[in-house]
Amino acid sequence: MATANGTEQKPELISPLPIWLMGFGWSPVGVGGAVTLMAMPQLLSAQHVPEAQIAALTAFALAPGFVCFLFGPLLDWRFRRKSCAIGFYLLGGLGLMMALLSVGHLAALAFWEFFAQLAISIGANALGGWFSSLVPKKQAGALGAWFTVWNIGAGGATAMVAVPLIRATSLTTGAIILGIWSTAAVILLALLPCKAADGRLAHESVKAFASDVATILKSRIVLWTLLIFLSPVASFALANVVGGLGRDFSTAEATVSLLLGVGAIIAGIVGSLAMPVIERWVSPRNLYLWLGLIGAIGSALVIVLPRTPLGFAIAAMHENIFQSAGFAVAYAIALRTIGPDDPLAATQFSLLSSAICLPLTYMQIADANGYGFGGVSGAFAMDATISGAACLLLLVIFRHFRRIIPAG
């Protein structure tokens, strides 16, 4: 946020840790995603659970990423954001452990996956609102990139070792280790400063939620940002189901784990850290749309790949690189909309983060239907068609209304 003389207003509190290390606070999102979206589909596939059912369970597990914005008032007013981030991350680790222990009981599995993802999402939203007050706005792009690096990197490492760990030890041992690993970031969070909570009672916060959301929505830049995030332009939801497609590409389980792990880590580094550099020439909003369009073309080309381990590796790398790049830009856009010491920072970040997550849910369902009609080709064709069309439409809209749209 700029002051009257054009200089950027500095946050009241400054992080004592470098930006790259602050990004580790986002790692529970990656670990939770790896267990839910990569390891779990492999474990269920080994039990011969139908792919459509696996996709439905995965989509249900992603739903908390959208509905968690309802908890925004508690993160801004009733409790300190630091306490919320730590507490909900710990609950998320418990939920992941119970989900793994319930892999043979699909109803219980669905509940614990939903519980874990809801807790992690709330914790991440608290962290987003908190961290936005610890760095200048000009560093939002770097923070968003490092969020994604640790998200994808921690997720990739988890995806690489989760199933082999369970096979080498036992389901119980693996579940406990992965649950504890998902909470490692709370050690870092304990070292960072945070302002005290507002102190109002929780029921007062809930009553005020609608009016505060209305206040946020009066901002034109927030409204246009929501339009982008709610559209399926750069969700690359196929990255979340590719772990269950190993058999379609004649790829062994161990190879799938290795490719997803190494591929996700490389994607996290290349896709995320390239974005702040490209943003020097392309605005984050336009970059987000162009990423979606180019990525959709790449997804369409996957259809012609041979159904071999090499084809699987190319498909997995493509989806993960573009998804990580999309997340890096999306978080940068979201962080830039929040002013320093904004009292509604967590509520606003929750709203935008939920919008980012919603396309992952409905595109997961669309891709599953595409798979049901035409297997791997149907899934990739469905994803490429919907996201590509959305990108083209939004590029036309933003070009037509560029004079009334706030810069972003």
Image: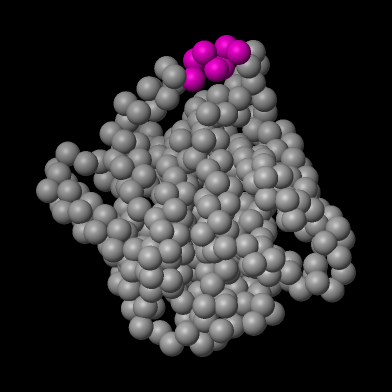
Q: Residue furthest left?
A: 400
The answer to whether 149 appears left or right of 329 in the picture is right
Kindly identify the residue that appears in the image at 44 percent across and 53 percent down. Answer: 365
Kindly identify the residue that appears in the image at 28 percent across and 34 percent down. Answer: 220
Kindly identify the residue that appears in the image at 53 percent across and 29 percent down. Answer: 70
Q: Position of residue 166 (x, y in %)?
A: 80, 67
Give the color scheme: rainbow, by chain, secondary structure or one colour: one colour
Relative height, residue 203 to residue 181 (above, below): above
Which quarter of the figure has residue 83? Answer: top right
Q: Which of 219 and 7 is in front in this view?
A: 219
The answer to whether 213 appears left or right of 184 in the picture is left
* Magenta extent: 203-209
Q: Nearer the viewer, residue 133 or 8?
A: 133
- Overall secondary structure of the magenta section: helix
Task: Check the picture and name the quadrant holding the N terminus.
Answer: top left
Q: Position of residue 44 (x, y in %)?
A: 66, 63
Let me know if residue 145 is in the magenta part. Answer: no
Q: Nearer the viewer, residue 129 or 302?
A: 302
Residue 266 visible in the current orientation: no
Relative height, residue 198 to residue 36 (above, below): above
Q: Where is residue 106 in the image (x, y as percent from the top left)?
A: 68, 50
Kindly identify the residue that appears in the image at 49 percent across and 15 percent down. Answer: 208
